[in-house]
Amino acid sequence: MPEITEAELKKQIKKKDFSPIYVIYGTEQMFIKRYTEKLVEAVAGKNPSDFYFHRFGGEVDLDELAAAVQIVPFMSEYNCVLISDVFLDLMNADEIARFKDILARPVSGTVIILSMPSYVPKRNAAALTSIIKKAKKYGSVCEFKELDRGTLERYAAKWANENGKMISRVNAAKLISYCGTDLNLLRNEIDKISAYAKGEEITMDDINKLATVNLETRVFALSDAVLEGRGEKAFAILNQLFYQKEEPLMMLYVLSMAFIDAYRMRVADECGVTMAQVASDFSYKGRSFALKRARSSTSRVSTQALRNCLDALTEADGSFKTLTVNHRLYLEQLIARLLLIVREGGV
């Protein structure tokens, strides 16, 4: 069977018309977890028997998995095998090959569900791709991709309504800019703000007072302050990040990505390349707003200054990974250095 949509997966669950194998993966963890739970319940029931429901995850014992998928259901309609977040990076080539072979050979009545709600293989990323390709021959594959801003805003409005509140598209967009595009976090923020907001509508004041601002948003604000030459604000944001005990290496990583966004857009503009093309070439998907922000914040900074900033950030990354340094002092010196580069390299 080919790749199926969310609607098609929902239809199969409702009709109990199951494929022998499912692979459920993607960037939207909330949907992956929700539909995995729905599918397991539809196949194995609300209170599944240990005889006909087998759960695996992490480091999978392939011998036990092979035995589980071969069980023939007698007292139940189906034998359900759930494999969640299998550690593909810890498998060698032979183990990957055997894993794929096991998935391709379930007995009649067995439904295998391979779900990847939170683990994404890096070293063996190709293994997941090959497993998905093979699964399409024998069962159904459903990918939950990152949602666009408009869809996120509609979900925010829906969840606010479920809490007896309203939220405008403008305010929903502001909340998303604060907490990011993770659906679980967005749902939690809507529930929290709805509980504390006094009026019928979630206002901008409610959001500013109650919303949790994620690390990426705060570091982007730091990069904007640096690129605009606003030293006092930059150091105030940096102090707040340390006060909230954010990981310094992650702060440096996100700061570097913000400057990379800025440099990519600057070079693209100089070469006549559109923002849409940059987003496509560098897989920004639903993050093209970062490019728009980067273009705006760097309007008064020269291209050479941006290159010098990237050199400073690359040097800092090497120092963090190879030297024993005082991370707070080093980041403070780095911000001062970036501010100086921007000041001297204005256009």
Image (cartoon, rainbow, N blue to C red):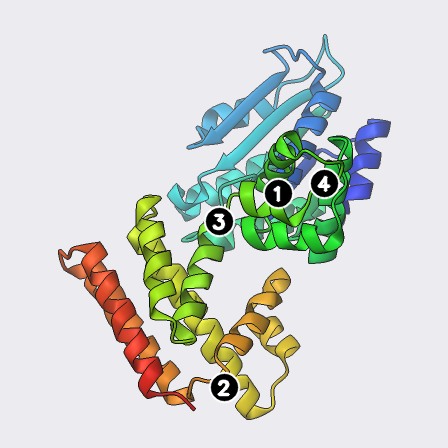
Which mark is nearer the camera, 4 or 1? 1
**What residue appears at the point 42 percent right and 72 percent down from the top-left corner?**
259
Residue of label 1: 206
Separation of residues labelled 2 and 4 (CA atoms): 45 Å
Label 2: few (<14), some (14–19) or many (≥20) C-alpha neighbours in 10 Å: few
Of marks 4 and 3, which one's residue comes earlier in the chain? 4
**What residue appears at the point 63 percent right and 10 percent down from the top-left corner?**
49
Of marks 2 and 1, which one's residue comes earlier in the chain? 1
Of marks 4 and 1, which one's residue comes earlier in the chain? 4
| Amino acid type of the residue tagged 2 in the rendering | Val
Of marks 3 and 2, which one's residue comes earlier in the chain? 3
Residue of label 2: 267
| Amino acid type of the residue tagged 3 in the rendering | Asn
Q: Position of residue 324 (x, y in %)?
A: 13, 56
Task: Judge by depth and name the residue closer to the eye, 178 or 282.
Answer: 178
Q: Is residue 83 left or right of residue 60?
A: right
Against 144, residue 255 (above or below) is: below
Separation of residues labelled 4 and 1 (CA atoms): 47 Å
| Amino acid type of the residue tagged 4 in the rendering | Gly
